[in-house]
């Protein structure tokens, strides 16, 4: 590879400020939605005694695991020694921080009373996976900041490999912790599975890569910077492999559940009888979120068309939100089985009652809060690349491809 030069994002004038204005407006609307929920109480949301984690949690968890996956590009460069990915590493680390901050902000604002965060930060129950995750999230941000410093400060470059390994291990722990939130919840039939942790890790790889690819293509196209086919081919192939891995884990998860008689009712609920959850699973998660993107990314013709790659990445993002909707909300909608072999006559918490009897419908404030978290992550990313040198001047084939014929 030739020597890589970095420069601030060159978009200026009405285009840049207009973009920030749009994102700021979305964030402001999300803020008003949050104030509305806090002032009126959570009865204005679609949540109830059965569905206690709503749509904001879907967006928050998506952003958190995508933050871990966004760092994958930097890890490939510094941990595994793939030089082609080194020019892409700075943006990778920046997005890891901004996506995590966006996700955590949505999570905090969905508490119903943000002051509860003080309790969470000062009182720890280390039997709870939630307490572990506080350290994992805060530690991740601190480590990635140091990681970025070693990449951007020439005198600290010699430490990049060591810090990169530490960041790689930490982010695996972070995503494992997030997946274990569900894997450790034995009371929920759809959550109690050890495969949740590795499945969330591979989900993070795919969703982080999809968002990274979209931001990379957008920033380079708007600034008219060369982005060669070699780099694009490597990234889209990685995305395709990660999506295929999600497909494999999804298949294994449901086949394993089908093998155990105790899980047949839950599988029937998700795969056949769950109404919106069944449709979301088959159309959103499986078809549009995995099969169609894999068909595009691995197709010899479509796989090299930039418009098609963009569509595939957007579908992966959409599929990720659909997947987490099924996991988070569908898993709660299925009735609790607190007393096996006994019939619950009446309960205020709907244990034993069909989830469809207490249907959850996302409210507008919930959706706006989730979208606001995405907008915040994007706005901070765009501000970052505008004021600091995160982006290479060129990723043309003659620069990024070591085997390119001059």
Image (cartoon, grey):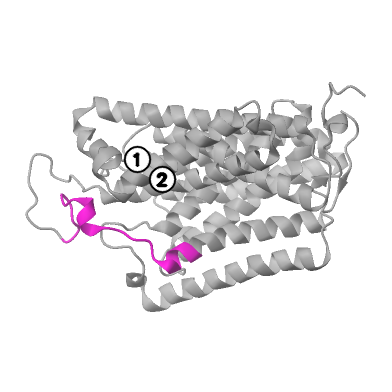
Q: Position of residue 65 (x, y in %)?
A: 53, 44
Label 2: few (<14), some (14–19) or many (≥20) C-alpha neighbours in 10 Å: some
- Provide residue 370's location: percent of width, then percent of height: 50, 60
Residue 196 higher or lower than 298, as above or below = below
Between residues 95 and 398, which one lies in front from this camera angle?
398
Report the magenta residues as a range.
Answer: 348-368
Q: Quadrant of the C terminus?
A: top right
At 12% across and 40% down in the image, what residue appears? 340
Q: Nearer the viewer, residue 54 or 267?
A: 267
Mark 2 lies on residue = 129
In front: 111, or 326?
326
Q: Is residue 316 left or right of residue 143?
A: left
Question: Is mark 2 in CB contact (under 8 Å) with mark 1?
Answer: yes
Residue at 47 percent of width and 41 percent of height: 288
In which quadrant of the rendered image does the N terminus lie? top right
Residue 184, disc: 1
């Amino acid at each position: 590879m030739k020597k890589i030069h970095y420069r601030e994002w060159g978009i200026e004038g009405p285009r840049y400020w207009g973009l920030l204005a749009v994102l700021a407006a979305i964030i402001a609307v999300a803020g008003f939605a949050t104030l509305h929920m806090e002032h009126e109480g959570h009865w204005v949301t679609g949540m109830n005694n059965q569905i206690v984690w709503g749509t904001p949690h879907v967006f928050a968890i998506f952003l958190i695991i995508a933050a871990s996956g966004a760092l994958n590009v930097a890890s490939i460069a510094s941990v595994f020694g793939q030089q082609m990915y080194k020019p892409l590493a700075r943006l990778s680390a920046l997005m890891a921080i901004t996506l995590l901050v966006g996700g955590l902000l949505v999570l905090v604002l969905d508490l119903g009373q943000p002051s509860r965060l003080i309790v969470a930060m000062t009182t720890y129950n280390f039997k709870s996976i939630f307490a572990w995750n506080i350290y994992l999230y805060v530690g991740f941000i601190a480590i990635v900041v140091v990681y970025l410093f070693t990449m951007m400060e020439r005198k600290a470059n010699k430490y990049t490999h060591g810090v990169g390994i530490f960041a790689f291990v930490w982010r695996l722990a972070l995503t494992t912790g997030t997946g274990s939130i569900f894997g450790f919840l034995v009371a929920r039939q759809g959550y109690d599975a050890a495969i949740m942790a590795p499945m969330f890790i591979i989900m993070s790889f795919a969703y982080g890569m999809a968002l990274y690819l979209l931001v990379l293509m957008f920033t380079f196209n708007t600034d008219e910077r060369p982005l060669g086919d070699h780099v694009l081919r490597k990234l889209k192939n990685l995305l395709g492999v990660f999506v295929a891995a999600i497909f494999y884990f999804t298949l294994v998860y449901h086949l394993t559940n089908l093998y155990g008689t105790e899980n047949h009712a839950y599988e029937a609920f998700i795969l056949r009888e769950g109404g919106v959850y069944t449709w979301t699973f088959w159309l959103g998660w499986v078809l549009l979120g995995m099969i169609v993107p894999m068909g595009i990314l691995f197709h010899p013709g479509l796989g090299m068309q930039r418009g098609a790659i963009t569509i595939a990445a957007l579908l992966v993002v959409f599929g990720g939100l659909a997947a987490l909707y099924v996991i988070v909300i569908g898993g709660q909608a299925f009735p609790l089985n607190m007393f096996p072999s006994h019939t619950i006559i009446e309960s205020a918490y709907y244990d034993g009652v069909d989830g469809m009897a207490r249907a959850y419908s996302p409210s507008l404030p919930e959706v706006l809060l989730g979208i606001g978290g995405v907008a915040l992550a994007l706005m901070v990313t765009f501000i970052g690349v505008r004021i600091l040198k995160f982006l290479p001047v060129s990723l043309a084939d003659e620069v990024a491809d070591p085997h390119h014929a001059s």
